[in-house]
Image (tube, helix red, strand yellow):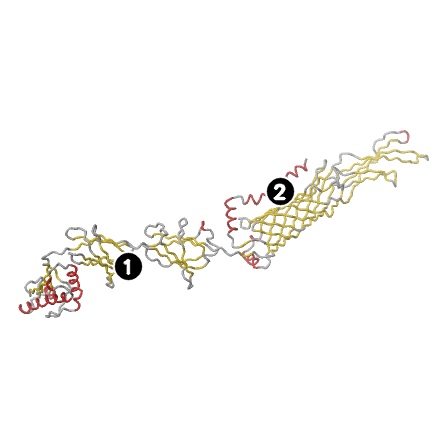
Amino acid sequence: MRSNRLQTLLCLALGALMLLPGTIEAAPAKKKADNKKYAKSNLDLYQLHHLNMWGGAGYSGLVNSYTNNSFIGGGGGLIGVGYEWHYKNFMLGLGPEFRLFTSADHYTFPNRWDVDISRTEIQAGMPVQVDEVKHFDLHNFRENNVVGQVMLPIVAGAQFPDAQVPMFFLAGVKVGYTLFSNYSQKGDLTTSVTDRIAMDDWFDMPEHDVQTVPYAAKGAIHPGLDVALTAEAGVLLENFFSEEWKAANAERKYPWHMRVSLFIDYGLPILQNGGSAPVVSVTPDPADASKALFATNSIHGSDASTSGLNSLMVGVKFAAQLQLNHTKQKKPLNPYIGVRVEDNRTGELITPDGLRLTVQPVGTKRAPRPLKAQPRGALHVSTRLAPGDYVLDIAKAGYLPHEPVQVEVVPGRNLNVKALEDTTVIRLDPVPVFQCYVRDSKTGKPVVATVQVVDTTNNKPVAKLRTSLAQGHAKGNLPVGGIYSALVEAPNYHSQIFAIGVQGLDDIERTFLIDPIEKGKTYVIENLFFASNETRILPQSEEALQKLYEFLSENPEVRIRIVGHTDWVGTDRDNQILSEGRAESVKRSMVERGIDASRIETEGKGESQPVDTNETEEGRQHNRRVEFTIL
């Protein structure tokens, strides 16, 4: 019963060892992550070959189920050398192993052994027949065994070098042959004698001649074939070494790997034994009729026809592995690059339609490579690129040009598009919109007009818009950063210039109120310059003359009267002649430009209609003017 319980406990221990790595790696999420890590590894771990050398020591014994037997066991060790093959996490190993172990048993003999001895003695000069029974009792009996075996382990398992505690496990069978199995026995042998027929007609005398002497015996048994189940689980040691050692080891032609583990070997019950107890023989000594011979064989017997004996070894094992080849390099997986393009004003994802993305390695003259926008979740682009530095160029209609963006693609990073650690976010500014409304300054009604926008920094037109009839509305885009003004022109309305201001990133909205052309209304021709006391128009007056010409061209039905005025310097007659000549000079300029002379009348008022004081130079300058009146 005791031996049966021991077998049950050993089986449970074997199952626990085989399940240990699975228990440690029980978290499904971690196991899934490890699988992904191997799947995406830059190294292909197939066909790794190792020369495996190991040694171990621990508790051992030959387990039996004998009645009156007390199993003690002993100690043992093993050494071996073999081959181990790896494929990713999977391991397969085999190779010869030598095991040497001891075992001890106590055995209690519940019976005694008797032998009849008959002899003739000379008593009082006469021969006398003596019959005796000699008794043998064996106490404190102990047998020790020493077993040597050659085994061939065939094991398979897995290793988990990237786990928090780098572990491995192996399980399989060991098939071997017992080279020798010796035993030695010790005990106390007590002998006594009972006489059946004695002199003087005494019968059945009590036991006498009681003696106790040490008993010892030794010999060999022949168990032969052994098949054992084996399992081990432990930790990989090199992960605990210094980074310097690991780096140097990785550079070796033949790197070393080391591990330590707990192991258990439990033999199947095929070791032969001779029965349930030692075979004891007690026979008369043929050389001396007064004596008897006492002998025992091994507890474990030598009869090859019986079975029921199990070998056992549990202990600690250390293995050193010499890696015979290096891992083959797979083509490295290029990292993903993730790009998200947002509207800088709203923060929303920009639609991919019309989005142009190109990528170009830094420092090369290769043409930029277009990236196709394939939205995936919150990304516009998710594509693999070789590690390095790149420049991204982005453009989309309706958005301002964006400065190229430099990104770094790091090897070994962002290998899974579903778990990108880096996303390049680019924010585009929408092209700002300039919109205007043109209305009649008197009635507020919409006016169909032409709005010409001019960059005031260089006087170059940048946009020409036309307002709608329904709302007097027009819109367009202006380059960011410029300072603008608008020339508003419409039939039967005066052309007018309005300041717009600086175009920033925000939209601009303006309302222009233009004055209708009214008969009888008089306007001063601003910035019109003449030579002193002459009718000759100076060149710097060209802009003023051009505006008057454009007004007359855009309003062909309008007739005007040009009136000249002077200050009071000089005689009245001279000033009158001068004012008339200056009005004629303006008319002549208009006719030369293509305006029908019949549409223009001239008149001189001399100094008669001042608009300011003639006592100051500034006042006199205001009085020297040319006006025109709508007829």
Q: Is residue 497 above or below residue 318?
A: below
Q: Is residue 544 visible?
A: yes
Q: Quadrant of the C terminus?
A: bottom left
Q: Amino acid at mark 2?
A: Leu
Which secondary structure, mark 2? helix
* Residue picked out by circle 2: 14
Q: Quadrant of residue 448?
A: bottom left
State the image coordinates of residue 130 (x, y, percent, origin top left): 89, 34
Category of crowding for the residue at label 1, using alpha-carbon neighbours closer than 10 angstroms: few (below 14), some (14–19), many (at least 20) = few
Q: Amino acid at mark 1?
A: Gly
Which secondary structure, mark 1? loop
Mark 2 or 1, nearer chain start: 2
* Residue picked out by circle 1: 481
The reply to whether the C-beta atoms of the residues labelled 2 and 1 are less than 8 Å apart is no
511 or 466, which is in the foreground? 466
Q: In the displayed structure, does residue 23 sit left or right of residue 179?
A: left
